[in-house]
Image: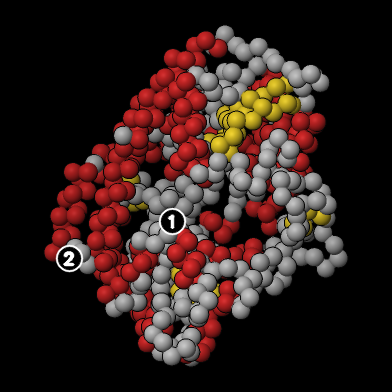
C-alpha cells in the first residue's frame, strides 16, 4: 500500500509539473538576492530564518531562502513532501536529511523521468568543482549519484561515519566482569557463561536478583545481528543500518535467512532467551524504556546491551559514573569458527539535494554554488558546527586529533549555543580524513571524548566484515519499471522474516518442527521474485551498464 501511495503521488506530480515545464521565472528579493523556496526538516532547537549559517549562506551566495519546514519525525516529514509533490505546489529545492525524509532511488528515477527533478551534471561541471572532484574521486559516490540514464537527478550526502560502518556492537559491563573475575567473552559459549554469572552472582552487590544480563530496544537493536554473525553473515547493506535480505555467493544474489547456519544462529539465541539471559522486553520496549533501565536510580542493572553506542542505553557523564563501566565486545566466534560483523557502507544513503523545475536558472546556479562550498573543509566546519570561535576553534597546543596520527584541523566547542549551524543538513563531503582530524579529548569515558571511545571500540570490529558476501546496495539501481514491485516485496519479506525470527527466538514457534514451513512461506511471500529482480540489477551493474 505504501508503494502504491508513493507511485500515485509521483504520478500526480508529473501531471501538475507540466505548467512549469517551460522554465521558471527568476524571483529576487528587495535587496537583489535570488529567492529559493527550500523544503527542509528542522529540529525544535533550530529556526532556519534566524540561523547563523543561513545568514552566512544568504550573504555569500546572494540567496533569500523561503523555508518550507518539516519536523525530524520521519513519517509526517515524508507525508508532507509527498503532498507537496502531488499538489504541484512543490519547492525550488528539496534540501533533506538522510534519516528523516530522503528520496529513494525509485523516487529519484520517477521524478527525473517526469521532469520534476532537474538534471545536475551540467550545473556541476560548470559551477561546482568541489562536487565534481568528489564524484570523480569516489567511485561509490558517483555510482549512487548517477541514474541508469546517465543523469544526476539528486545528490546523496556522503558521511564517513567510521563507527556507523560497523553497527553490530555489544557493550558489556566491565565492572561486573572484574568483580566476578571474568574475561571479556570470545566465543558464543563464553558469552553464555558470562550472562549466566551476571544473572546469578549479584554483580551489582545489592543482594537482589535484579540484574538484566542482556537487553536492548526495538528501534536500536543489533541483538540478532551481533549474535547471528557468529554463525552466518548477517548483512546490513547500505541504508543507514536497515538490515538487508541479500548477500552474494560469488556473483549470485542469495538470501542468508534460509541457510542451515542461520537456523543454528536462531537456535543459539533461543537458548539464551529460554535460560532468561535475554530480557523478554528486548523485543518490545522502546528507547525510552531502555534508558529507564540503564539509568535505574536504585542500582546498575544492565549487564550488556547490543546497540550502536552507549548513550542509547545510559546517560553519558552520569553522576555515579555508571556510563564508564561499559566497553565493546569484539565479534564472537561461533562453534564453526565464524566471526563476522555487519558492514553498513556507505553510512549515509538516500537522496537529499534535489532541484526541481520550479527553480529558475539563477536559483539553480546559486544553489549548486552553495552546495559546492559545503563540499570544502571550510564549508563543512561552518555548516556543521557554526562560525569559527562560536561552534568550533582552531586546535591549540597539546590538542590531538581523533586519529592521533594526523594533524588536527578543528576543535568542536562543547558549550556552543543553539541555532548556530545546519548540522545534519550539511554533511555532503564528510570524509574520513575530515572526521578524523577533529580534536577529541584523550579521556574516552567523558561525553566530550565519546568520538574517541567509539573510534577505539570500532577497531575491534573492522576486518570482521565479509566483503565477498556484501551486496553493494546503493550502486545497484533497480529497473525503474520494477521499483514499485521491489518496494512491496521488500516490505512484505522484511515483515515475514522479522515475525518468524522473533517467534523462533521466543519459542512461540518450534524451530526444528516449523523451519521447513518458514522457508516454504518465504517463497509464497515473494523471495524468489525478489532475488530475481536483485540478480538482474546486479548483473547490469557488473557488466558496467545500468
The picture places residue 490, in percent across and down from the top left corner, at 33, 42
Q: Quadrant of residue 90?
A: top right
Please report the residue visible at 72 percent of the width from the left and 32 percent of the height from the top. Answer: 370
Which dot marks residue 510? 2
As helix, strand or loop, the secondary structure at mark 2 comes to loop
The disc, 1 or 2, on the residue closer to the chain's N-terminal end is 1
Query: In the shown orientation, is residue 198 left or right of residue 311?
Result: left
Give me the C-alpha separation between circle 1 and circle 2.
26 Å
As helix, strand or loop, the secondary structure at mark 1 comes to loop
Please report the residue visible at 15 percent of the width from the left and 55 percent of the height from the top. Answer: 517
* Residue found farthest to the front: 298
The picture places residue 275, in percent across and down from the top left corner, at 29, 78
User: Residue tagged by mark 1?
Assistant: 219
Around disc 2, counting alpha carbons within 10 Å, would you say few (fewer than 14), some (14 to 19), or many (20 or more)? few
Please report the residue visible at 46 percent of the width from the left and 29 percent of the height from the top. Answer: 82
Please report the residue visible at 49 percent of the width from the left and 49 percent of the height from the top. Answer: 240
Residue 470 visible somewhere in the drawing:
no
Q: Looking at the rendering, in which quadrant would you find the C terminus?
A: top left
Amino acid at each position: 500500500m505504501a508503494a502504491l501511495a508513493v507511485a500515485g503521488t509521483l504520478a500526480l506530480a508529473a501531471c501538475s509539473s507540466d505548467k512549469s515545464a517551460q522554465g521558471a521565472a527568476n524571483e529576487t528579493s528587495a535587496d537583489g538576492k535570488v529567492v529559493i523556496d527550500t523544503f527542509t526538516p528542522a529540529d525544535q532547537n533550530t529556526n532556519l530564518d534566524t540561523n547563523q549559517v543561513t545568514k552566512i549562506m544568504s550573504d555569500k551566495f546572494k540567496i533569500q531562502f523561503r523555508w518550507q519546514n518539516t519536523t525530524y519525525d520521519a513519517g509526517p516529514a515524508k507525508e508532507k513532501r509527498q503532498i507537496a509533490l502531488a499538489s504541484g505546489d512543490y519547492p525550488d529545492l528539496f534540501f533533506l536529511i538522510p534519516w528523516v525524509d530522503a528520496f529513494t532511488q525509485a523516487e529519484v528515477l520517477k521524478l527525473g523521468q517526469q521532469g520534476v527533478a532537474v538534471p545536475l551534471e551540467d550545473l556541476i561541471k560548470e559551477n561546482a568543482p568541489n562536487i565534481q572532484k568528489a564524484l570523480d574521486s569516489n567511485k561509490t559516490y558517483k555510482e549512487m549519484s548517477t541514474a541508469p540514464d546517465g543523469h544526476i537527478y539528486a545528490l546523496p550526502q556522503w558521511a564517513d561515519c567510521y563507527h556507523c560502518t560497523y553497527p553490530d556492537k555489544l557493550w558489556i559491563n566491565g565492572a561486573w566482569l572484574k568483580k566476578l573475575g571474568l574475561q571479556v567473552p570470545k566465543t558464543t559459549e563464553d558469552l553464555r557463561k558470562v550472562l549466566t554469572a551476571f544473572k546469578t552472582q549479584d554483580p551489582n552487590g545489592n543482594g537482589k536478583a535484579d540484574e538484566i544480563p542482556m537487553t536492548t530496544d526495538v528501534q536500536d537493536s543489533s541483538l540478532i545481528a551481533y549474535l547471528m554473525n557468529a554463525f552466518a553473515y548477517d548483512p546490513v547493506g547500505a541504508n543507514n543500518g536497515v538490515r538487508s535480505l541479500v548477500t552474494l555467493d560469488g556473483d549470485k544474489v542469495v538470501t542468508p535467512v534460509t541457510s542451515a547456519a542461520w537456523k543454528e544462529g536462531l537456535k543459539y539465541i533461543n537458548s539464551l532467551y529460554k535460560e532468561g539471559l535475554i530480557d523478554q522486553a528486548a523485543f518490545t520496549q522502546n528507547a525510552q524504556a531502555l534508558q529507564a533501565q540503564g539509568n535505574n536510580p536504585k542500582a546498575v542493572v544492565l549487564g550488556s546491551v547490543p546497540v550502536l553506542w552507549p548513550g542509547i542505553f545510559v546517560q553519558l557523564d552520569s553522576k555515579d559514573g555508571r556510563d564508564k563501566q561499559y566497553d565493546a565486545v569484539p565479534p564472537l566466534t561461533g562453534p564453526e569458527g565464524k566471526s563476522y560483523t555487519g558492514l553498513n557502507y556507505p553510512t549515509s544513503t538516500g537522496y537529499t539535494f534535489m532541484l526541481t523545475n520550479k527553480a529558475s536558472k539563477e536559483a539553480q546556479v546559486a544553489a549548486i554554488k552553495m552546495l559546492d562550498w559545503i563540499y570544502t573543509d571550510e564549508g563543512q566546519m561552518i555548516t556543521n558546527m557554526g562560525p569559527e570561535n562560536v561552534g568550533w576553534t582552531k586546535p591549540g597546543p597539546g590538542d590531538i586529533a581523533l586519529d592521533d596520527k594526523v594533524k588536527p584541523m578543528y576543535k568542536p566547542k562543547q558549550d556552543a549555543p543553539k541555532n548556530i549551524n545546519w548540522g545534519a543538513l550539511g554533511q555532503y563531503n564528510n570524509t574520513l580524513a575530515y572526521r578524523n582530524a577533529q580534536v577529541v579529548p584523550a579521556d574516552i569515558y567523558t561525553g566530550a571524548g565519546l568520538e574517541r571511545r567509539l573510534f577505539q571500540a570500532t577497531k575491534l570490529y573492522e576486518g570482521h566484515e565479509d566483503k565477498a558476501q556484501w551486496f553493494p546496495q546503493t550502486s545497484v539501481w533497480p529497473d525503474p519499471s520494477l521499483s514499485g514491485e521491489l518496494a512491496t516485496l521488500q516490505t512484505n519479506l522484511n515483515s515475514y522474516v522479522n515475525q518468524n525470527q522473533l517467534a523462533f527466538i521466543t519459542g512461540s514457534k518450534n524451530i526444528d518442527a516449523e523451519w521447513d514451513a518458514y522457508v516454504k512461506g518465504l517463497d509464497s511471500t515473494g523471495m524468489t521474485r525478489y532475488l530475481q529482480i536483485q540478480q538482474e540489477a546486479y548483473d547490469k551493474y557488473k557488466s558496467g551498464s545500468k
